[in-house]
Image (tube, rainbow, N blue to C red):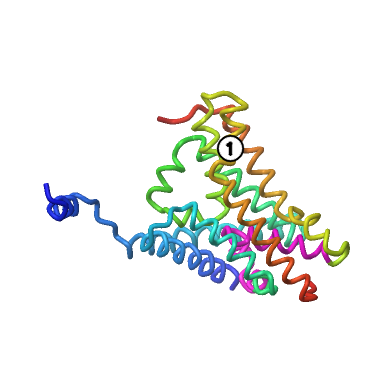
Amino acid sequence: MLFINSFLFCGAVCLIAQIILDNTKLTPGHVTSLFVVLGAFLDSFSFYDKIIKVVGGGALLPITSFGHSLIHGALAKANVYGIMGIMMGMFDLTAVGITAAIIFAFIFTLIFKPKN
Amino acid sequence: MKVEKYEKIAKDFKPETHKIRNAMIAFVVGGLIGLLGEIIIEVLCHYTHISRSSAGTIMIVIMIFTASLSTALGFFDKLVTKCKCGLLIPITGFAHSMTSAALDYKKEGPIYGIGTNIFKLAGSVILYGIMAAWFFGMIRFLLGGRI
């Protein structure tokens, strides 16, 4: 069941993004930024956590999950350290993704030559 | 030449955008990426007996690795022009934007080329992600919410 949910959810997010991209003057940069904000908004009342429970891996992949992990880590730390915890925990969960992206991007840039 | 006349001629030469076809391609490709992610999680959980959340982390690293490598090899750009949002909205698009920006400015040197431009496209995602998470996090915290 999780497989079907993953397919439908991840596909639906991409479908909405594609419709916004085709019917407005927004660029892909605008759409991805918009979806990160949307992910953070959905998790501010723990709605995205419920989606992840139902959908599984498919909900971790879209860029909305990036916004969700930012606010989730921030609030988890805020429970322990108070208001400064929001800043302390901001990168707790997203650190893996950002660090991996930086490392692989840098290594592959050094190895490969740009095409055309 | 009058403006209306120009627009009429330009309209004939504009490449037709197939909105419905684009949307269906984005749905199928995005769905397949989500399905692949779930399959990787299930396989990792089944064979290595790690928890579901750490399997999810490893899955994201695998996806970023694949996207970076295929961008550097040059065929990810062609796929993006065909599938558009199907590949840009999943985390693969984030990795793709960083690797392609770094590769484009490689000739300008390691500091002012790669260093200043690696976040050129991904920077907006991080900036607005953090601003939104901070803003909504403050609201949630001040309302007394608990995760």
Asked if A10 appears above or below B60 in the picture, the reply is below
Q: Amino acid at mark 1?
A: Ile
Residue B68 in picture, x, y percent from top left: 56, 41
Asked if A115 appears above or below B21 in the picture, the reply is above
B87 with respect to A111 (left or right): left
Query: Among all residues in the image, which is located at the extreme front?
Result: B2
What chain does mark 1 sit on? B
B74 with respect to A110 (left or right): left
Q: Residue at x 68, y 64 (%)?
A: B135
* SS majority, magenta: helix
The one of A115 and A68 positioned closer to us in this rendering: A68
Q: Which residues are magenta?
A: A51-78
Q: Is residue A57 magenta?
A: yes
Name the image quarter holding residue B38: bottom right
A104 with respect to B80 (left or right): right
Q: Which residue is mark 1?
A: B118
The one of B35 and B68 positioned closer to us in this rendering: B68
Quadrant the N terminus of chain A occupies: bottom right
Q: Residue at x 53, y 24 (%)?
A: B108
Residue B129 in picture, x, y percent from top left: 63, 57
Q: Residue at x 54, y 70 (%)?
A: A4
Secondary structure beneath dot 1 equals loop
Name the image quarter holding residue A19: bottom left
